[in-house]
Amino acid sequence: MTNHSSVRRARLYIVAVLCAAMSACVTWPVGTGEPFVDKTKGYAYTAPIGWYQSPAKLTRDKLRTFTRDGSTLQNIVVGRIAHKNAFSSIDKDATPEMLPQDIAENVIADIKAFLPNDTFTVQTNAPATLAGNEGVRISGEFVSEEGLRIRLTGYYANTEDGIYSAVFRAPTLHFYDQHIEEFETSVRTLRIL
Amino acid sequence: MVLAGCAAAPTAMQDAGDLENLDKDEERLWAMSDEISDGLEKSRAIEFDRQSMLYLQSLMNELFPEFRQAIRVFIIKNPEANAFAMANGHVYVHTGMLARLRNEAELAAVLGHEGAHFTERHVLERMRNAKNMSVFANVMGSFTGLGGALASSVIAASSMSGLSQANESEADAIGLARMSRLGYDPRAAAKPFERLAQELKARDINEPRMFRSHPKLAARAASLSDMAEDFPGVEIGEQTYLDNVGHIRLAALEQAVEMNQGELLVFLLSTPDQMQSYNGQAQFYLAEGYRLRADEGDEALAVAAYQAAIEAGNQAARAHGKLGYIAMRAGDNEAAISHFEESLVLDPESPDSAYLASYLKKLKGDNND
């Protein structure tokens, strides 16, 4: 598992570098209040106005990233995660039968396993709705490898087709508080098609 | 490269005064170690529990009185078994290691071993013998878990990632001598290794790659038992140990729950002597272990263990919540409502209370329909 983790991290790093390199050449569309529609994944989401949308489908599950000033300063990641290997850091699949509390439990374990030195502290974990589906809202904080406190708030809802999620992440100092309301407003625009 | 392989072993330190005269490469090693230590200690990984930190530090000071202040002990919040020493004298012990140790004599053996790695300058020796710095950097990473190695490695179990068999044997011998001098039973030193070997087998984990060039756990335990014959000592200190770190051992179980490690919890708690070492406070965590492991038949075992926890008054609110959840999934709404209500009466602020309230609202709505 250790080797898998290291390989996965190395791959993610390479992908991140490649994406950063690519992003220099590709325009990131800026949000104008029109919804972004992913017909393949079956959802529509309207990012805050003035936020940029990642042009490439960067990950296995083709999640979309939105940011205003750069991904390290604040980002919202939206998409649908397949049940298969949904919690990859703990090598666990999700199932359509999982209730919101199961999803929350596994999301937290997955985040803890992924982050260095298990620094993720859960601040709130409660039922919520996402795109009209029963789901969860999890908020917590971790310390990055650079020693920066990062706060994360995510909504997750399990469906027959996978787990829909919208996750906002930003440094605790200044950036989280500056944008959390924009995120909360934008989450309410998520629609399953 | 050939010359590097022949580098002479550094001289062992005699006391903290030797820290005034470090070679240039050792100073660089300290700088690297300090950087890693800073990262760890500023992260949320460290358990800053005053009672247990003082307890471990006091024992280390007794084991190595001439290095008082030079060796500093920290506890890392991680349910896996590990303890390791950095070149700068910072020794880290996982909560998971404390959960597996049973008494002060075993703790003295672990601290004595780690302290010896520092006083004998084993990491410096490893660096001087490394074929290149990138290999050594990997070793440093494995010491600290940077890159994820620590979080997922049960074996880290040894403190010995990257060090030679000779280093380990030397640290074992010094650790035994130091613990024996304080009157601890040296036969206790082998016990953690025996249990770790059992754990690897039970959890179907191969001994990690690092052990290919190191004594296997079983051999290590046998070697420690043999060496123990040469040292006196009878003190075990079980109650003192549990009085000082009992709450940290329970915290390790909670961390295992948060990390979804059902198999680990079941291993740690499924025998009467293991359960007894938690003084009747771990029944709930055994139930959580069965629920999270979710093998065939585990749900029934979880239900029985939750009921036992309730009878023992051990986290009864949370146990009721879990029983209600299991009943709800099975379609027994009446039992589910009863358990949820009981849970909320016992502890309206429990971590699951928001979920329980939402289930109750839904179930009562369903029943009214």
Image (cartoon, coloured by chain):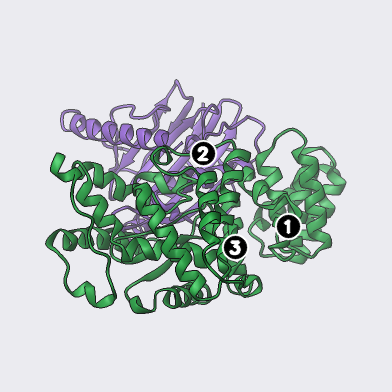
Chain colours: A purple, B green
Q: Residue at x 81, y 43 (%)?
A: B327
**Quarter occupied by the N terminus of chain B:** top left
Left-right relation of A21 to B257: left
Residue at the right extreme? B334
Image quarter of residue B292: top right
Q: CA distance from mark 1 to mark 3?
A: 15 Å
Q: Residue at x 32, y 31 (%)?
A: A11
Q: Amino acid at mark 2?
A: Ile
Front-lying residue, B3 or A58? B3
Mark 2 highlights which residue? Answer: A90
Please say if the residues under marks 1 and 2 sit with CB atoms less than 8 Å apart: no
Mark 3 highlights which residue? Answer: B249
Residue at the front extreme? B230
Circle 3 chain = B
Give the number of the mark in front: 3 or 2: 3
Give the number of the mark in front: 1 or 2: 1
Local crowd size for mark 2, using a 10 Å CA cut-off: few (<14), some (14–19), many (≥20): many
* Callout 3 and callout 2 share a chain: no
Find residue B338 and report its horizontal and vertical position in percent.
84, 54
Q: Does residue B363 lie above or below B272 as drawn? A: above
* Rendered image: mark on residue B141: none
Mark 1 highlights which residue? Answer: B273
Please say if the residues under marks 1 and 3 sit with CB atoms less than 8 Å apart: no
Front-lying residue, B52 or A65? B52
**Which of pointers 1 and 3 lies earlier in the amino acid sequence?**
3
Find residue A71 and report its horizontal and vertical position in percent.
28, 44
Q: Amino acid at mark 1?
A: Asp
